[in-house]
Amino acid sequence: MSVQAILIAAVVVGGVGLFIGFFLGISGEKFKVEVDPREEAIMGVLPGNNCGGCGYAGCSGLAAAIVKGEAPVNQCPVGGAPVGNQIGEIMGVSAGDSVRQVAFVKCAGTCEKAKQDYNYTGVEDCGAMAFVPGGGAKTCNYGCLGFGSCVKACPFDAVHIVDGIAKVDKEACKACGKCVAACPKHLIELVPYDAKHLVSCSSKDKGKDVMKGCSVGCIGCHLCEKNCPSDAIHVADNVAYIDQEKCTGCGICAEKCPKKIIL
């Protein structure tokens, strides 16, 4: 190949490259999307976990929603009040009071306390239990299956299987809600971090049937309800529920509970 041909090829390639670069530069200016500087400032404040706990696809989605007024400034569960206050300053509004929340597993049926109908050997996934006899080996159809789907879903290493049931590390939990969505038994809920008393059972069976499957299940005896001075606890569908806004933390319900499942 002659030197002249090489030079011509180089000029052509270089010319095409310059044309493409010029074209892309013009197109970028013409079609660029203006980003509100507040959105970028909020992105700099958000923790960047992209966990989806705020209800948006990621931190960028939340930042855009806050700027548009579609989400409150304290929407990020991971950042909590400190991040909410910083975003409030950026937006020029008050973040208001926010209550820190954590995940809570409504089951106390450990290996020793919960009975099993058979020994299960197979895929260790809570969702897969819907396809096995009885919905799992545990006699209680409402209890924690203990295969750790919530553990796998948690991006903060805040959930672990201890003695056959899921346990939440309150200090590590960011209330992103991933574990809540992952539990097929709907055993996990978000509760105030400083909640004084919680019912660690979800069984809707009648007392006699509850005792057949678990020695610490709620039997719906109503003793907690009858003795609560604040009308904060009621039995519905055979299981007790505590209204955290009414609860004063007096502890009478825990004292009266014969199964000691109010923590």
Image: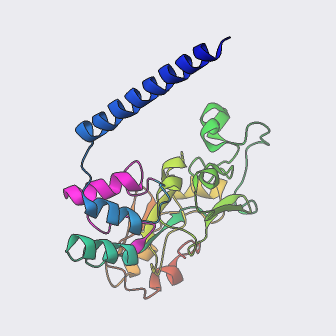
Looking at the image, the residue that sits furthest to the bottom is 250
Count of numbered badges drawn on the protein = 0
- Which quadrant, please, contains the N terminus? top right
Residue 52, image x, y percentages? 44, 53
Horizontal relation, residue 161 to residue 17: left or right:
right
Specify the quadrant that holds the C terminus: bottom right
Front in this rendered view, residue 138 or 162: 162
Compared to residue 23, the image places residue 125 above or below, namely below
The colour scheme of the drawn protein is rainbow
Q: In the drawing, does residue 250 fall left or right of residue 42? A: right
- The secondary structure that most of the magenta stretch takes on is loop
| Residue with the most extreme top position | 1
120 up-or-down from 201: above or below: above
Name the residue located 61 percent from the left edge and 65 percent from the top edge.
Answer: 158
- Please tell me which residue is depicted at 72% across the width and 58% down the height of the picture: 164
Name the quadrant containing residue 127: top right
Q: Is residue 203 visible from the viewing direction of this image?
A: no
* Residue in front for this viewpoint, 261 or 82: 82
The image shows residue 241 at horizontal and vertical percentages of 41, 66
The vertical placement of 43 against 19, above or below, is: below
On the image, the x and y values in percent for residue 233 come to: 38, 73
Residue 199 on image: x %, y %:
50, 69
Residue 23 figure quarter: top left
Q: Is residue 61 shown in magenta?
A: yes
Q: Is residue 227 highlighted in magenta?
A: no
* Residue 162 in view of the camera: yes
Instruction: Identify the residue shown where x is 73% and y is 49%.
Output: 116
Q: What's the magenta region?
A: 52-80
Which residue appears at 46% of the width and 76% of the height? 193
Q: Front-most of 118 and 220?
A: 118
